[in-house]
Structure formats: C-alpha cells, structure tokens
Image (cartoon, helix red, strand yellow):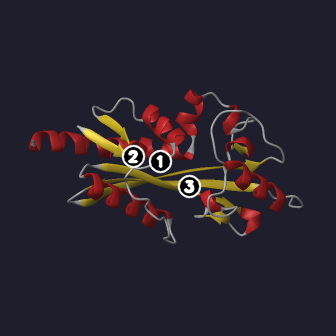
C-alpha cells in the first residue's frame, strides 16, 4: 500500500520516514511530483492547514495521504510566530531568516519559554479526513544557535528535561521526543488500522 507524506521539505520527509519505518506500507515523498500544485496554508489553525494539505494532496494524487502542520508559540511574544512559524520572516524566507528574526525579537526578553505544537492527519481521496493526532513539546529558546542537525528553529530550542538543543540531539533521540514525533507516534495506531482495513477491501 502507498501512503503519501504531503510535504516538499525533504528534511521533514526523512524525519517522518524514520518515525514511521515500522508501518507496513510504502511512504512516498510528495516532492517527487514536480507538477503537484503548491497548496497554500492560509487557514487560521493548525488543524485546518493540515487538513487542507492532506485532503487536497490525496485528491490530486488519488492516494491516501498524511500531512502535518506545526506552530511555534513563544510566550513573551504573545504566542508568535504561532501558526505562521514557517513564514515568520516573510514569504520565501529561509530557516536562518526565521531564527534570526526570533532571536532579535527576544533580545531584551527574560521569558524565553516556548511550545511547539504539531497536528498530524490522515486523509483519503474519497473519504476525506480519517483522523488526526496532536503532539506538543515545550522548552526554552537560547540566545545563540547550537548544533548542526535538524531544521527550522531546532538550533535554538532546548526541550524541557534536556540541556541540549534539538539540533544537538542524535536523530534517534529527536525522533522519539519531538513534537512532530509525538504527533505521528499517536497517529501510528490509526494508520495501522487504516492500512489493515484498506487491505481487506482490496
């Protein structure tokens, strides 16, 4: 059985492929379809964005699809960048642009507490949204980047209970404890049930 991971972010795809490696299915990278239209994530909530991405990709490729949307909520910045975490420094910005803007905004802030929140979702081209799960990890933002792994805000985020950033963690650890890992680990039982039911219907 084929399941599409609806992202053009190769780093995210590889991370999810490792988290979901025990599933009895073939995981497909949406970025391998160059003619697939860009799906605008213009909703106000993570659930709406993840649902839109999963359902529209499933319909376009006529395959079951998984998607996620992640927000980064910084307490002293009134929960910014929030749902717009990937576009914090503007459209077409880089990871480095976003991190640099975040560090600038926090320059004079004592409270550097923040939470990542991910919605993971499974959709079918005909049945629509099957189910979703939520993962969250909170921690603190440091003032300088540390580590070389990961992507996004990973170099400046130290999760609760640890003294290293996501970027300093080995992939095996991050893929167990991160917000995205938690969301997709919760989705695994849903995926296994779905795969079994689809196999029975074939």
- Residue 160: x, y in percent? 69, 44
Helix or strand or loop: what does disc 2 sit on?
Answer: helix
Q: Secondary structure at mark 1?
A: loop
**Distance from Cα at disc 2 to Cα at disc 3:** 22 Å
Q: Is residue 179 above or below residue 131?
A: above
**Residue 178 position within the rendered picture, expressed as x and y whole percent measured from the top left:** 57, 42
* Residue carrying label 2: 30
User: Separation of disc 2 and disc 1 at Cα?
Assistant: 6 Å
Q: Residue 151's quadrant in the figure?
A: top right
Residue 164 appears left or right of 7: right
Q: Are marks 2 and 3 in contact (CB under 8 Å)?
A: no
Say which quarter of the image contains residue 77.
bottom right
Residue at 21% x, 60% y: name it: 127
Report helix, strand or loop for mark 3.
Answer: strand
Kindly identify which residue carries mark 3.
117
Residues tagged 2 and 1 counted as in contact (Cβ below 8 A): yes
Whether residue 10 sits left or right of residue 60 in the image: it is: right
Can you identify the residue that label 1 sits on? 8
Which is more N-terminal, label 1 or label 2?
Answer: 1
Location of the C terminus by quadrant is top left
């Amino acid at each position: 059985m084929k399941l599409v991971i609806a992202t053009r972010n190769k780093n995210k795809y590889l991370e999810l492929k490792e988290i979901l490696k025990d599933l009895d299915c073939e995981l497909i990278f949406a970025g391998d379809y160059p003619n697939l239209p860009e799906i605008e994530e213009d909703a106000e909530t993570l659930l709406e964005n993840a649902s839109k991405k999963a359902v529209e990709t499933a319909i376009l490729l006529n395959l079951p699809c998984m998607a996620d949307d992640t927000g980064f909520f910084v307490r002293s910045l009134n929960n910014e960048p929030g749902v717009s975490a990937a576009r914090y420094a503007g459209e077409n910005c880089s990871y480095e642009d976003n991190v640099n803007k975040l560090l600038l905004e926090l320059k004079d802030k004592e409270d550097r507490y923040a939470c990542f929140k991910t919605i993971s979702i499974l959709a079918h081209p005909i049945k629509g949204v099957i189910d979703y799960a939520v993962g969250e990890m909170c921690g603190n933002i440091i003032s300088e980047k540390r580590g070389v792994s990961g992507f996004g805000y990973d170099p400046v985020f130290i999760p609760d209970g640890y003294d290293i950033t996501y970027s300093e963690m080995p992939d095996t650890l991050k893929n167990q404890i991160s917000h995205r890992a938690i969301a997709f680990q919760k989705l695994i039982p849903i995926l296994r049930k779905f795969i079994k039911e689809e196999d029975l219907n074939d």
